[in-house]
Amino acid sequence: MKIAIRSIKGKLFVWFFAFSSVLLIILGFSLYHKFKETIFSSVDNALHSKLQILKGLLHEEHDSIEFELDEVVLGEYSIPRSGHYYKIIMNGEVEFISESLVDDDFDLASGRLESYDEELMEKIYTSTGPADEPIRVLQHDFEFLNIPTSVFVAESISENLSMLNSIKLFFFIITPSSIFILGIVGLLIAEQSLKPLKKFSSAIETITHKTLSKRILSAVEAEELRSLADSFNAMLDRLQNAFDAEKRLVADASHELKTPLSVIKAQCEVLLQKDRAKEEYIEAFETIKHSVESLNKLLNDLMSLSRLDSGILSAADFEIVPVNDCIKNAIHLVKVLAEEKNIHISIDTKENITIPGNKDRITEALLNIIENAVRYNKTGGSVEVSAFKDNTRAEITIKDTGIGIKNNDLKKIFERFYRADASRSTEGTGLGLSIADTIVKAHSGSISVKSKPGEGSSFVITLPSGNTG
Ligand code: ADP
């Protein structure tokens, strides 16, 4: 069964715990084996030196082989079951044997063969001694005066084994308790490491739409969370800007709606006060109609903006747009206004200019700019619309002979609801250019303006040509 650990703390703890447990177990095992190896090799070394001594005690005397009874042999080897034994077999017969063995037939090489060195003719056994104790036996086969000889030296290893057992016990106690302690330490480390994250999340929790200006940098201590905090703060900046823009739009829109509504209300009140002459009614209704038209235009512009803000324009839906058609459609829509002001509109374009985009929206952007060129023009003035395209871009220029725009206003005319003082007397919502700008930007293009007050303005729309090569 697979148990999914969802919390970072849990995962950190499990990894830390698993890793340290495996590490401790491996460490324990290898240390124990190292101890075991060292202990047995020191026993084997002792057996080797004793074997050399015993071999040195063998000598020939009066045609027979004698074994010199040195004090070594008389010492620990003479005490029954002392834990130190030897046996010398020549020609298959037991020739010399330590008194400690007690029984002459006791077989020292009866246990488990631990190693065999063919070159040195040495075998090492672990076996059971005459006192039922564990013993280590070294057997060496050689020829003494051409007689096949085997010397067995043995030592009790009960002390060594009990020492090894103590070490084993130590590891059995130490390893689990270390794992337990490491587990607790792991938990504490996980808890401690995640504290900044908790702080971070509580800092985020305090941010609401009312406290969008708050930033969370001050709460972040951990270096790793800095970039997260930076991205989060940048997101808050964007949100706050959007929020502020939205608020401004609502406030400005309400303000703009107020004027025509108050005009309508005032006209109705005047009409309702008493009976009026027919002409007065007509005049009042004309004013009301005019206000309703402004309201209608304002609402249409607001809806356009809101649609554009919601990202209705996506490059994925773009089609091939014939720029000339858009220009002609836009000019057709301002024809009446242009005729009223006796303004001549000329077109200078090549027939086949196309760009990737949305035809209706590009027409809307052009209409807003051409309509301005007519509206803010002098009676009898002119508007020139030209377009060209090269490999990288298409440019549409709308040049008028109108009132022009002051330098100070030039920077602001694309802002929502901005209207220069000079144009206050004319109809308008202050949204036309920001709609055009949003549309052009959604097509990855830009709008630039050059203007001289009293002489005229020139708006240039630059759009990507869509040529990939
Ligand atoms: P409006 O509805 O007022 O025309 P716009 O966003 O279209 O709103 O334009 C913003 C302001 O920019 C206008 O109020 C006007 O002052 C100025 N403007 C725009 N186009 C022209 C132009 N061709 N000539 C002079 N002023 C212009």
Image (cartoon, rainbow, N blue to C red):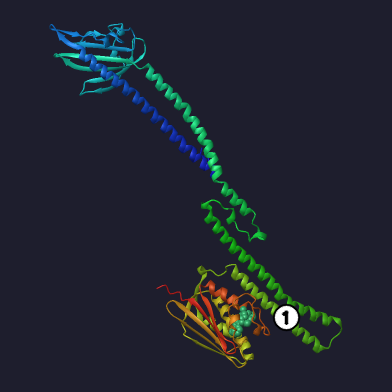
* Quadrant observed for ligand 1 in the rendered image: bottom right
Taking the spot 49% from the left edge, 30% from the top edge, the residue there is 176
| Observer-nearest of 276 and 56 | 56
* Residue 383 shown left or right of residue 62 in the figure: right
Residue ID for mark 1: 291
Q: Can residue 300 be seen in this view?
A: yes
* Residue 270 shown left or right of residue 114 in the figure: right
Q: Position of residue 389 (x, y in %)?
A: 45, 81
Query: Which quarter of the picture shows residue 442?
Result: bottom right
Q: Where is residue 303 in the image (x, y as percent from the top left)?
A: 64, 72
Q: Where is residue 61 in the image (x, y as percent from the top left)?
A: 14, 7
The extreme right residue here reads 274
Position above or below: 228 against 2: below
Taking the spot 73% from the left edge, 78% from the top edge, the residue there is 259
Q: Where is residue 353 in the image (x, y as percent from the top left)?
A: 47, 81
Query: Which quarter of the picture shows residue 39?
Result: top left
Bin the neighbour count of mark 1 within 10 Å (Cα to Cα): few under 14, some 14-19, many 20 and up.
Answer: some
| Observer-nearest of 430 and 25 | 25
